[in-house]
Image (cartoon, rainbow, N blue to C red):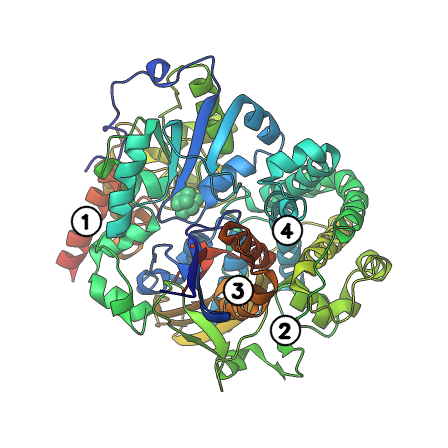
Amino acid sequence: MSTTGGAQRSQSPRDAVARPRKVRLAVFKFASCDGCQLSLLDCEDELLAVAEAVDIVYFLEATSRVESGPYDVGLVEGSICTPEDAERIRQVRRECRYLVTIGACATAGGIQSLRNWADHEEFLRCVYARPEYIRTLATSTPIAAHVPVDFELRGCPIDRFQLLEVIRALVWGLRPRTPRHSVCLDCKRRGTVCIEVAQGVPCLGPITHAGCGAICPAYGRGCYGCFGPAAQPNGESLVSRFVSGGISAERLVPLLRNFNAAADEFRCQSDRLQRLGEGER
Amino acid sequence: MTGERRIRVPALSRVEGEGGLFVRIRGDRIDEVKLTIYEPPRLFEAFLRGRPLEDVPDITARICGICPVAYQMSSTHALEAALGVSIIPEIRTLRRLLYCGEWIESHCLHIHLLHAPDFFGADSGIELARRFPDEVARGLRLKKLGNELLEVLGGRAIHPINVAVGGFYRVPRREPLLRLLPEFERGLEAAVEMTRWVASFDFPDYTRPYEMVALQHPDEYPMNEGDVASTNGLRVPVAEYERQFEEFQVPHSTALHSGRVDDHRAYHVGPLARVNLNRNRLSPTARRLADEVGLEHPCRNPFRAIVARALEVVHAFEEAIGILRAYRPFTPSRVAYEPRAGGGCAATEAPRGLLYHRYALDDRGLVTFAKIVPPTSQNQRQMEEDLRDWLPLVLGPDDAETALQCERLVRCYDPCISCSTHFLTLTVARE
Ligand code: SF4
């Protein structure tokens, strides 16, 4: 499954978004924490202006106004974990001319994708006394694994300014763009001393997609990969460096298996490390 | 079938997460009231097992994007209890400051964008802003200040990155916090005005005989510490929580319900419970304001929870101002610990009410057991009982209007369905 934006459709937003009519925007939620859609409500200075520029016609968390599709732009938060949701996302796709996934849950499967490595029945029994009441899938999968996605916005949570950029671009009928370099570069820009080099703290910055503003190293901790893999990540070499520096697989596997655990590059590296760790034992 | 009516709200709006409501009425008897929660379960308690304890605050934060700090606070305190770590007073104070930021952000979101629209028949905060532009703009400014505090202390507002077991990854410098001070002083005045506005709303004359549950602390308004207390006279240490309250499963919900252990009876957590149990420990301005706006003591009108929420915003501003003024950076930013096998629990006051966590650890510092009881699970049974009592009062010929009245009651609780899954669509069936 592609989780790094490979599933983009060739349709241009200009065809998708008919102007000058106001863009009809819908926000949908699947398995998630609501944090990414909250990012829109967290644009306190811009919220009322956004509500003027676009017509928010479906956004359950924020409004009781419910209009049916079709919609010009659909923002989708969350991953697919139930048979009903696997069906619902197809319906959502049919109703949205331009579909944007927002956040790690929607673009990679989220933290709940940890079930992909586990015995699902046992997981259900762990949380529920009567697992038979619960209907879920054994995996948590990104939206792009189910339907074509036009643009993916990364992060756990997404950055609200990037979200505003995407909405602005779509209002103007332009293709949204967000930088795809690594967190490492943003650390240099911020003037943060490299904590991997200076303190030997394992840091996913070199292979993680930018967008957060490189906050973790500035607060004295290693990057833990909220934005998923950067463009052309070299995870193998980073992981090898950590291992030769004496950091155990036991510490590295959970670091890679976070909110973007099921994103290709992170998954490959954590699986490789796990095999390595098992070989050591 | 004659005389049977079903009313359904397939998807509740202006709540966090996915849920609905289903009511079945036979003749004039309310047969069934269900908050149906179809938010897909994310199984946090299952996948936390085997994770290093250091990951827990970051992972549990992802249960809820609206109150991540609450999850970080309950988890760090529970893990610290398991490790035998006692934090230093400076860390304790900085954690209260962080919680002030989240209370401000979460409460102002609920008051202005989710709840106030109900009192004016508006669909959303955005629509409300057309009628009350100054009030909504003021609310958004207050909310933003909460977020700015979270950003300075936590690195970012949603899922802050600076909370660690034992303390903080890095303590903030004095200047960025001092820069917030003048804005917070104006914010306190604005929060007082906001409370007066909210208290002037037209509230249904409706009360319920709640048992209200919140933390209680001898000398402060509860956030991170205190005993579990109730308006029926219960007062026990947090370690006794599971002997008093129990989670159980119902077929119509992916969220576990919670009730008193003996008979699974409902109880009520949240801002109203906190104010009722701790009114004399509110900050001086909030305490005077509670009297000025005429909040009954105790208040058992669920619709007036919005007033309690506003008073807590005032409290949070006033407390934050005191902490900001006195703040000096300190070391160590976190208390060191050695992994050891053991268990520990903690409860803190999330914006929506008491949030209980319990963990067990092995000797390598890996989690072997996790239990998380969010406020909305605890309120779920109470919401259903309230609806049963409220429905005959609002039941009219028009199902849509009845459903709307039911949703209004549910929104008083500021339910967070994302949290409780591990919660709601009104579906009314009349037969
Ligand atoms: S990506 Fe992270 S912040 Fe966004 S909905 Fe998922 S868990 Fe929440």
Q: Residues within 10 Å of mark 1 (few under 14, many from 20)?
A: some
Q: Secondary structure at mark 2?
A: loop
Give the CA distance from mark 1 to mark 3.
Answer: 37 Å
Q: Residues within 10 Å of mark 4 (few under 14, many from 20)?
A: many
- Residue assigned mark 4: B107
In the image, which disc is placed on residue B375?
A: 3
Horizontal arrangement in the rendering, residue B35 relative to residue A279 (left or right): right
- Residue assigned mark 2: B212
Q: Are marks 4 and 1 on the same chain?
A: no
Q: Residue at x 34, y 72 (%)?
A: B362
Q: Secondary structure at mark 3?
A: helix
Horizontal arrangement in the rendering, residue A199 relative to residue B204 (left or right): left
In this view, the mark in front (1 or 3): 3
Q: Residues within 10 Å of mark 3 (few under 14, many from 20)?
A: many
Q: Quadrant of the C terminus of chain B?
A: bottom left
Q: Are marks 4 and 2 on the same chain?
A: yes
Location of residue A190 in the rendering, given as x and y in whole percent from the top left corner: 51, 29
